[in-house]
Structure formats: C-alpha cells, structure tokens
Image (cartoon, rainbow, N blue to C red):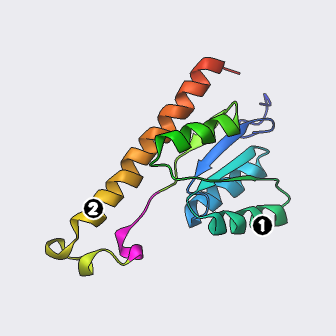
Amino acid sequence: MSGTDPFDLEGRRVLVTGAGGLLGAEFASALAERGAEVHLADLSAMALAATVERLAGEGADAKAHAVDITDAAAVAHLVDDVGDLDALVNSAAIDARFQGLDGGGHLEGYPAEAFRLSLEVNLTGTFLVTQACCRTMARRGPR
C-alpha cells in the first residue's frame, strides 16, 4: 500500500461474497478500481458471470467462484482456491421478500422455513466465510 494514498489496494487480494447481487457487485467494482485483485463469490453462477462481465468492461480481471456459503466444506474449498487474502467483504444475504417467501409481509403469515433460510445464509454463512478467512489471514500474518 502506498504511503500517500490510504485507498491504494494494488497487490491486495479481496474476497467479496454476494458478488452477484447489487451491493456485492458495487463493492467489487470499487475495490477493483482501487487496484485490488477481486475474487467474487455467489451461489448463482449466472449472476457471477454478469458481474465478471461488468468488471471486465471496467478493465478489471475478477475471478468468479460459485459457492454455497452455508456449506462449511464448500467455504473451506473456496478459501483454499482464493489463497492468501488481505480482506473480506461479506455481502451475501437473502431477503425473503424477494424470494416470494415472506407470507405477504406480515409476521403471522411469515413461513418458519423462510426465517430459517435467512438465518442460515445471513448469519451462519457469514460466520463460516469469516471464520475460514480469518484462519487463513492469521496463518499468513500481516503484510
């Protein structure tokens, strides 16, 4: 990192989860613009392809990883594939409203399965990715 620009990410490797979604794609774009090597993770290979294409149009070379972040073994494989990380952006999440699972938006009609799925992705998935990345970063030490 340059001594003059605290936002210079040249040579830094960053993993962005939920990179096929709106916020994840924006985070990835901003990081790539600052020089980071971005690795994109999302459940949807199609959404990832769209983000990779967008970033390529912006001059960035992003690497895509289709992965279910609620699967600990898949997350471990992802982090092994990415290699030494400098940063993680947890952007993966689901919203039952956009899945058509919210029971009309009222608590009394909200399906328990939709609630469980939200917890699994939004909390457990975030935990699993963060834990795996922290293990890798701790082994490597500061750069």
Residue type of the residue flagged with mark 1: Glu
Residue drawn at point x = 28 percent, y = 57 percent: 116
Asked whether 34 or 98 is in front, the reply is 98
Q: Position of residue 99 (x, y in %)?
A: 40, 74
Residue type of the residue flagged with mark 2: Phe
* Label 2 crowd (10 A; few <14 / some 14-19 / many >=20): some
Answer with the quarter of the image where residue 47 lies.
bottom right
Q: Position of residue 128 (x, y in %)?
A: 45, 39
Q: Where 81 sits versus 33, above or below?
A: above
Residue drawn at point x = 30 percent, y = 66 percent: 114
Q: Position of residue 117 (x, y in %)?
A: 34, 59
Residue drawn at point x = 71 percent, y = 40 percent: 7
Answer with the quarter of the image where residue 78 lies.
top right
> In the rendered image, which residue does mark 2 sit on?
115
Q: CA distance from mark 1 to mark 2?
A: 33 Å
Q: Which residues are magenta?
A: 93-99
Asked whether 73 or 99 is in front, the reply is 73
Pick the quarter of the image with the N terminus: top right
Residue drawn at point x = 71 percent, y = 21 percent: 143
* Label 1 crowd (10 A; few <14 / some 14-19 / many >=20): some
